[in-house]
Amino acid sequence: TTWTVSVGAVDLERGRGVLLSFEDVTAVEEAGAMRRDFVANVSHELRTPITALQGFIETLRGAARDDAKARERFLSIMDREVVRMAQLVSDLLSLSRVEQNERRRPTDPVELCGLVEQVVALLQPTAERDGVALRVSRPEGPIVVPGDEEQIRQVLSNLIGNAIKYGGAQRPVDITLAAPAQEAMLRAEGVRLCVADHGDGIELHHIPRLTERFYRIDSHRSRAVGGTGLGLAIVKHIVNRHRGRLRIESAPGQGSRFTVILPTR
Ligand code: ADP
């Protein structure tokens, strides 16, 4: 714990005295340290592609100048790096937007069945490329929760996207939307959105850290699949903002299951 102690003299109508004030600034110090870490991480994440781009530009001007094949290859790598940087900037913006509004709970009515279908349709081509079947199980009727549609879309898209990226080729992903049938239970338990893959699973000690910004189990793999390391941090903040809960269950060799529970009122 870090304390700031200030000493002052008081003279309340002749009765003299000394005022000692103690302030616990641990949280402030920790926030400062976290911000410095964050800035260092962002700088590092951006410097890597920038350095790569600089190298390729130099090569294109020099050695690869008259080699059409090499030029094409380098340009496509450069393209990938630029896409990665753009994704990083867009994730950073999302993160900062959610953090800014975290205290204000969003209350627009959001219909989840249609939203799940939309996100699944959007990710279908990516899944198909890896031979991943997206299997949806949901009730018939509409399920409405108070929230921010764009943000819940992002939660779904990040979780399903991760299941495709890390679940492994040819292994299906199960997306389940469940709402207890009885009104009283629905109110007590909320709606469950569950994304389960049949990949290699995650070792227990990583699980509590997955929602930290830039935490990756295998950064080579994350970069290779186009990850920024911010996806689950964004998910966590959005779920918090909706006063919901995020549960992560996984074990090596058993796949992973990410469950978001959203209150219905
Ligand atoms: P990234 O952009 O790297 O995917 P995320 O914040 O979405 O960042 O996820 C953080 C890390 O958690 C990933 O790098 C990966 O190591 C791990 N992870 C996320 N989802 C899964 C999953 N479904 N199966 C196994 N590992 C996962």
Image (cartoon, helix red, strand yellow):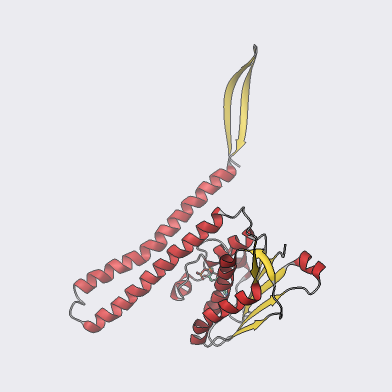
Q: Is residue 188 above or below residue 134?
A: above
Residue 54, picture quadrant: bottom left
Position of residue 34 measured from the top left corner of the image (x, y, whole percent): 52, 52
Q: Quadrant of ligand 1?
A: bottom right
User: Residue sitting at 55 percent across and 63 percent down?
Assistant: 234
Residue 105, picture quadrant: bottom right
Picture quarter with the N terminus: top right
User: Is residue 8 in view?
Assistant: yes
User: Residue sitting at 78 percent across and 64 percent down?
Assistant: 188
Q: Is residue 180 above or below residue 244?
A: below
Position of residue 218 measured from the top left corner of the image (x, y, whole percent): 50, 71
| In this picture, residue 84 sits left or right of residue 174 | left
User: Residue sitting at 62 percent across and 29 percent down?
Assistant: 21
Most foreground residue, 124 or 164: 124
Most foreground residue, 25 or 263: 263
| In this picture, residue 219 sits left or right of residue 20 | left
Picture quarter with the C terminus: bottom right
Position of residue 197 measured from the top left corner of the image (x, y, whole percent): 61, 80
User: Residue sitting at 58 percent across and 80 percent down?
Assistant: 199
User: Is residue 256 in view?
Assistant: no
Position of residue 18 measured from the top left corner of the image (x, y, whole percent): 62, 20
Most foreground residue, 221 or 79: 79
| In this picture, residue 145 sits left or right of residue 97 | right
Tell me how many marks there are. Answer: 0
Residue 261, picture quadrant: bottom right
Most foreground residue, 141 or 237: 141
Which residue reaches farthest top?
14
